[in-house]
Amino acid sequence: MRKLKLIWDFKGPNAELTSKHHLTHLREYVKANEVPILAAGVEHITGIHHICFVAVNEENMIEIRDNLKPHRGQLWQD
């Protein structure tokens, strides 16, 4: 089974804070809906670009994609 990384991009001077805040909501969602995840976090891309992500098995991707509308996705590599 493929593992996927669903990504939300945040850009601008408040990108880091916004991505950390979004991560809080992602964790609340997966806990409330009992969605199994492989990982979740925030990554620094540049000074004004941060991402928030959640990694899931492919079978759980559709629920998160449809409900939370990530900006993009890619294959997850442990």
Image (tube, rainbow, N blue to C red):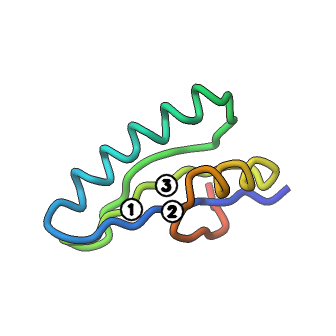
Circles 1 and 2: CB atoms closer than 8 Å: yes
> In the rendered structure, which amino acid carries the disc numbered 3?
Phe
Q: Tell me which residue sits at (42%, 55%) in the image.
A: 52
Label 3 Cα neighbours within 10 Å, binned few <14 / some 14-19 / many ≥20: many
Q: Earlier in the sequence, mark 2 or mark 3?
A: 2
> In the rendered structure, which amino acid carries the disc numbered 1?
Ile
From the viewer's perspective, tell me whether residue 24 is left or right of residue 78.
left
Disc 1 from disc 2: Cα separation = 7 Å
Give whichever of 69, 76 is nearer the camera: 69
Q: Earlier in the sequence, mark 1 or mark 2?
A: 2
Residue found at the very far front of the displayed protein: 67
Disc 1 from disc 3: Cα separation = 6 Å
Q: Position of residue 11 (x, y in %)?
A: 27, 70
From the viewer's perspective, tell me whether residue 11 is left or right of residue 37.
left
Disc 2 from disc 3: Cα separation = 5 Å
Q: Tell me which residue sits at (38%, 62%) in the image.
A: 51
> Where the C terminus falls, by quadrant?
bottom right
> Where the N terminus falls, by quadrant?
bottom right
Query: Residue at label 2?
Result: 7
Circles 2 and 3: CB atoms closer than 8 Å: yes
Query: Residue at label 1?
Result: 51
> In the rendered structure, which amino acid carries the disc numbered 2?
Ile
Q: Position of residue 58 (x, y in %)?
A: 78, 55
From the viewer's perspective, tell me whether residue 70 is left or right of residue 33.
left
From the viewer's perspective, tell me whether residue 18 is left or right of residue 47.
right
Label 2 Cα neighbours within 10 Å, binned few <14 / some 14-19 / many ≥20: many
Query: Residue at label 3?
Result: 53
